[in-house]
Image (spheres, rainbow, N blue to C red):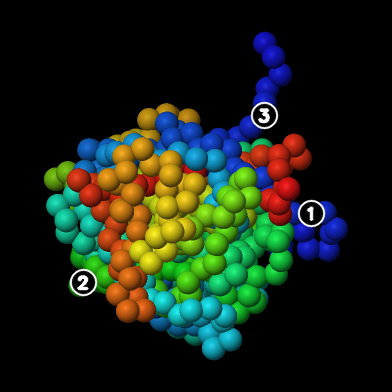
Amino acid sequence: MPAESGSNRRPETGAFFQRDRSWHPPALTPGYKSSVLRSPQKALLSFDNTLSEIAGPVFGHAMLGELDADLIYNFAKPGESAIGERIIVHGRVLDERGVGVPGVLIEFWQANAGGRYRHKKDGYLAPLDPNFGGCGRTITGQDGGYAFRTVKPGPYPWPNGPNDWRPAHIHFSVFGHGFAQRLITQMYFEGDPLIWKCPIVRGIADKAAIEALTASLDTQATIPMDALAYKFDIVLRGRRSSLFENRLEGN
Amino acid sequence: MAQSLDRLKESPSQTAGPYVHIGLTPNFCGIGGVYASDLGATMVNDKTKGERIGLKIRVLDGTGTPLRDALVEIWQADADGLYNSPVEMRGAADPNFQGWGRCPTDMDTGLCTFETIKPGRVPFRDGSLMAPHITLWIVARGINLGLHTRLYFSDEEKANAGDPILARIEHRVRVPTLIAERQGDTYVFDVHLQGEKETVFFDS
């Protein structure tokens, strides 16, 4: 119970705010061809969260290895390191109320500096970096903060249109305190002109929503003569107060 | 003008893409030595209480072809119907059962298998009991926002008949899309993303 450890406050048990589905990309975005046969077409079944959605798994800091949040070194041979622009990515996991979400697992993955993934399905001609695996993870601190070190991923071409390119991006998988908060998204980099041309990004209708996935260069957080920094906050669904609702433990 | 509600917007979702394994199951796709094992690969141990069951899940696209690059996560209560979660106020869940699992679909067959236990019944908001069920969350290339649904059990006919979520499904012919078929100790469940047999997905 990371949120409340060392406190006698009761954990929050309220249901989550309704998801604003017009803010997310819809299931069917024909410009992104893979969505055409993989998008549900019937109406979703809507209901207020039950305990099955309000509850969620907890991951403890004990599972983390020393280099889990350091992609420059976690796959590298001893004494070597990944090639590319060294960057720090940091930010907070918040909920829609603006409250930090502590103790939640974040996993991230990305292509190397040349835009190549270490995956048998990726045949892009840019070479693999023998010292770069491309995965990392961390758990948010008491204020919802997180940070990791990596190299800036390269953009790459992908089979969709005849000449489509993905902007540089890092994939994020985030748990909240309830399974209904579960989210996967991608972080883009400020100033990348490919963002606005990408069919996956353009599935999102609202420009402000796209900007919410674009990390800012954070010169205050750079390490001089070492690494640039980007700040990326992630927002999960907010939780209703259960003060005036039935207690989950029964009436 | 009235006061601002001062709320943030949820981060918009983006697809997990075809390389989701790198981040979530690196050992499965040959990236060894970073994590000792893939998270969520093992759900039960010798001390876990409850009836051992297997799940065989496939995710099929609009042509009926199984996805070979999807990832399925499951979330469930323990044998007594308790969640291993801080919001569980009714008692302490089985310490040998986290209740969460993760499995990529096989790159050749599209099959996704879990070894778990049959969950007990969990109360609905009004205190009545829901039928035993497992929550599913599915991501893949081409899925823009993770899909949420449930797996119910074919040998729980009576409980299923009284389940308040299944009862909300207007078109009754769609109820079977949420019910896994028991074959020995294994339940078989096909998720149809589209078409006549499209699975009932949730907005909750």
Q: CA distance from mark 1 to mark 3?
A: 25 Å
Q: Quadrant of residue B69?
A: bottom left
Query: Would you say A10 lies left or right of A54 here?
Result: right
**Mark 2 — residue?**
B109
Q: Are marks 1 and 2 on the same chain?
A: no
Q: Percent position (x, y) of residue A241? A: 71, 40
Looking at the rendered structure, the secondary structure element under dot 1 is loop
Image height of B204 relative to A108, above or below: above
Image height of A119 relative to A225, above or below: below
User: In the current view of this chain or complex, which residue is farthest to the right?
Assistant: A8
Looking at the rendered structure, the secondary structure element under dot 2 is loop
Q: Residue under mark 2: which chain is it in? A: B
Front position in the image: A21 or A200: A21
Q: Residue at x 71, y 51 (%)?
A: A250
**Mark 1 — residue?**
A10
Which mark is in front, 1 or 3? 1
Q: Would residue B161 be seen by someone viewing this image from the given angle?
A: yes
Q: CA distance from mark 2 to mark 3?
A: 48 Å
